Amino acid sequence: MRIPIRIKIVLLLLSSCLQAQEKKFNIHTVAFYNFENLFDTINDPTKFDDEWTPKGAQNWTSEKYNQKLINLARVLSEIGNSDNPNAPTFIGGAEIENRMVLEDLIRQPKLKKFDYGIIHFDSPDNRGIDVALLYQKKSFRPITFSAIPLLLYKKEQPLKAIEKDKESDEDLTEVITEKANRVFTRDQLLISGFLENEEIHLIVNHWPSRSGGEKRSSPYREAAGLLNRKIIDSLQGINPKAKIITMGDMNDSPFNKSIKNALQAKANKQEVPEFGLFNPFENKANKGLGTIAFRDSWDIFDQIIFTESLLQKEFSSYQFWKAGIYSPTYLIQQNGAYKGYPLRHSATEVGFSDHFAVYIYLIKEIK
């Protein structure tokens, strides 16, 4: 595969730091974007989508829906263009109502030429929103994919069942755990396949929200992190050198327990052990960068984290190069109380999202 001269120049600058000889590389962009309420206009009685209908609170008409699709397609086609003129090979997405809206999205003029495939499952989320993966068919061949449920419950109440032992007359207390009030949230989407001729695994996430407060809801996201780690461990058990990328809106920062303790993600490459995980977005958070803003405080909820197997110094196979946050001027609110925030939908304007997109590059030397 020939790659544009611009890519060759940028990557030659990279390679000059490693070796004093000319090298050329192939490049792929892996992106994640929270689409923020990508709903169609049709009322689905099985979902809480009444707000996103023509007669709902958002007055969600066909005109607004179509503009939302145009807006999203523009963003998705441009993520990572500073170093790779091709649109992302992989796009993880969140807050998606159904497969139909994704089919409408990839038919947009800005995306149609890239011939994206769709991997999507309906999840049990109360709001009726799902995660999905878009992938360029020319570069990636999916082999297996599944939606792995995250089983959460609001409370666990211990109940004591007391009875007498007939022979000793001794109290026997059995502690029974009653699990009630399941929290229905998004499944974790696992996709395995081949990027060109290399096996790769991707997990797309949208972890439980901070509804009820960060501290109170943290155990839910910690459980999501533990499930994620279990999936990764299983894949590494089959192939210790498996290349695994987990991405999504984690609703937690790189410093929270779900990332640091459950996933055990590291910020420094040198600290990542064998089978460990690297999070390039922790250092970006340390610099004050963000993908979402709340009360004038920035945080990075959207992250792409991956295994040590993508941190090798030799580029004979696809390896991580660098990461970024996509936040061009047109995605930023320019005035009003939310000046500087991501430009989201409002009563007067069909925006983009309340999140910025994140991305990483994978590169491989051309022999």
Image (cartoon, grey):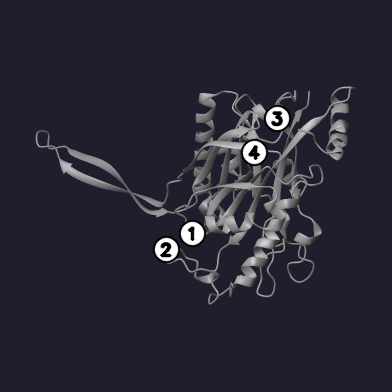
| Discs 4, 1 touching: Cβ within 8 Å | no
Give SS at disc 3: loop
Q: Say which of marks 1 and 3 sits in front.
A: 3
Q: Say which of marks 4 and 1 sits in front.
A: 1
Q: Say which of marks 2 and 4 sits in front.
A: 2
Residue 90, horizontal then vertical, whole percent: 65, 43
| Discs 1, 2 touching: Cβ within 8 Å | yes
Identify residue for label 1: 128
Give SS at disc 4: strand
Mark-to-mark CA distance, 3 and 2? 42 Å
Label of residue 318 in the image: 3
Mark-to-mark CA distance, 4 and 3? 15 Å
Q: Mark 2 or mark 3, which is nearer the start of the sequence?
A: 2
Identify residue for label 4: 305
> At 66% from the left edge and 39% from the top edge, which residue is drawn?
138
Give SS at disc 2: loop
**Quarter of the image where one finds residue 21:** top right
Identify residue for label 2: 46
Mark-to-mark CA distance, 4 and 1? 26 Å
Depicted 273 relative to depicted 122: above or below: above
